[in-house]
Image (spheres, rainbow, N blue to C red):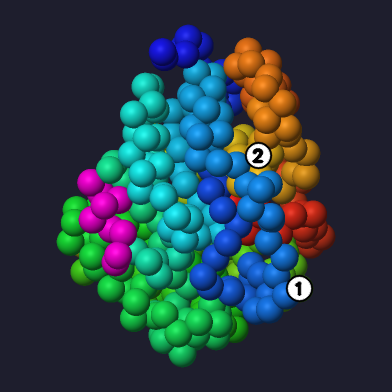
Amino acid sequence: MALEQKADLTDRHHRTINYLRLSVTDRCNLRCVYCMPDEGMTFIPHREILTYEEMLHLVELCVANGIRKIRLTGGEPLVRRGIISFIDRLNRIENLKEITLTTNGVLLKEFARDLRKYGICRINVSMDTLKPEKFNAITRRPFFEKVWEGIEEAESVGMAPIKLNVVAMKGFNDDEILDFARLTYRKPYHVRFIEMMPIGAADARMKGFISSGEILERISTLGPVRRVESESMAGPAEMYILEGARGRIGLIGALSHHFCETCNRLRLTADGQLRGCLFSDRETDLKTPLREGREGPYLSALIRDAILNKPRGHDLDLNNPRKCVRPMSRIGG
C-alpha cells in the first residue's frame, strides 16, 4: 500500500529538499589517491550495511516526505551484488521521479544495458584523465580502456546525458582541462570539473587545488562560452556550453563558490545514517530504530527533523579547509 504523500518539505532556510544521494556500499574496485589508501582500508562490516529491503523502506519514507530524485553512489555501487534487481524495485516506488547513478565505470560495459532497461537513463562517470598512465596513477588500477568501453556502451544503449566527473588537480591533470573541454565538441557529454575538497586523503593534497574560476578562464581560450540553465532537481554544477559544442561543461566550486543557498540534497550512508550536508558530521541514525522495529511515523519524524535542521552551509574556507570524520567512501560520493 502506498504511503501517504506529504507536501514537499523545506528546511529552516526555505530550501526545498527533494534529492537523496543513497550510498549502497562503501566497497570499491579502485583506490583513487584522493579517496582511499591503496592498502589497509577498513570497510564497514557487512552486518552493519543496510539490506536492500531496509533501503527500499527508507526510500519510500523519504519519498513520502518530498524526495523526488535518488542518486545511487558508493564506494562503487555496481560492485554490490543484486544492484540491478534493487534498481528495478526502486523504480516501482510511486512518486519517485528519477533515479541516477554515479560509477567509476569499471563495470559499466557489463551493466549498461540492464541499467538502461530498468530505468537508469543518465549516469555520472568519475574520469579524471584522458591519459592511461595518469589514470593508473590516480586510481592505482589499470582499467582505463575498460572504463572508456563502458562509457561508449552507455552511449550506445541510449543513456543521456553521460556526465564525466573530473576532480581538477593542479600539477597533475590541469594540463588536460582543454582536452576535456574539446571533448564536448564531438560528444554530447557533460564534462564537470570538480574542485578538490578536503575529504579523507585529499586533505593532504590541497596544494593541488585549482578553482572553478581559473578552469573557466582556461576553457574560454577555446572560444565563446555561455552560461546555460541547469536541469530540474539538478546538483550544484554551474553549466556552460562552448559555441558549436554538442555537450556541456559543468563547474562545481564547493570551496571557491559556495552553493549552499540552493542545496536540495540529503545523503543516506550505506550503514543507515542520514546526513544533511557532505561536510557536516551531524548524522541521524535511521538504521537502529528501523532494526528495533520502529514504525513508519517514528522514522518519518526523524527524516523530517533531518530536513528541517539541514545546515545552512558547509562552512568551508579556501584558506582553512577542514575534513570530515568519515572518509568519502563511507559517506557516499
Q: Where is residue 165 in the image (x, y as percent from the top left)?
A: 45, 62
**Considering only vertical position in the picture, is 28 above or below 172?**
above
**Identity of the residue drawn at 64% across and 67% down:** 35
Q: What residue type is labelled 1?
A: Ala
According to the picture, the residue beneath numbered tag 2 turns out to be 272
- Helix, strand, or loop for circle 2? loop
**Considering only vertical position in the picture, is 5 above or below 156?**
above
Residue 111: say if magenta.
yes
**Considering only vertical position in the picture, is 82 above or below 329?**
above
**Identity of the residue drawn at 45% across and 38% down:** 70
According to the picture, the residue beneath numbered tag 1 turns out to be 204
Q: Where is residue 44 in the image (x, y as percent from the top left)?
A: 69, 55
**Identity of the residue drawn at 50% across and 34% down:** 53
Give the camera-side residue of 69 and 75.
75
Q: Earlier along the polypeptide chain: callout 1 or callout 2? A: 1
Give the camera-side residue of 279 and 170.
279
For the C terminus, the quadrant is: bottom right
Can residue 197 be seen from the camera position used here?
Answer: yes
Task: Classify residue 269 by image quadrant.
Answer: top right
Q: Position of residue 171 (x, y in %)?
A: 59, 83
Residue 84: say if magenta.
no
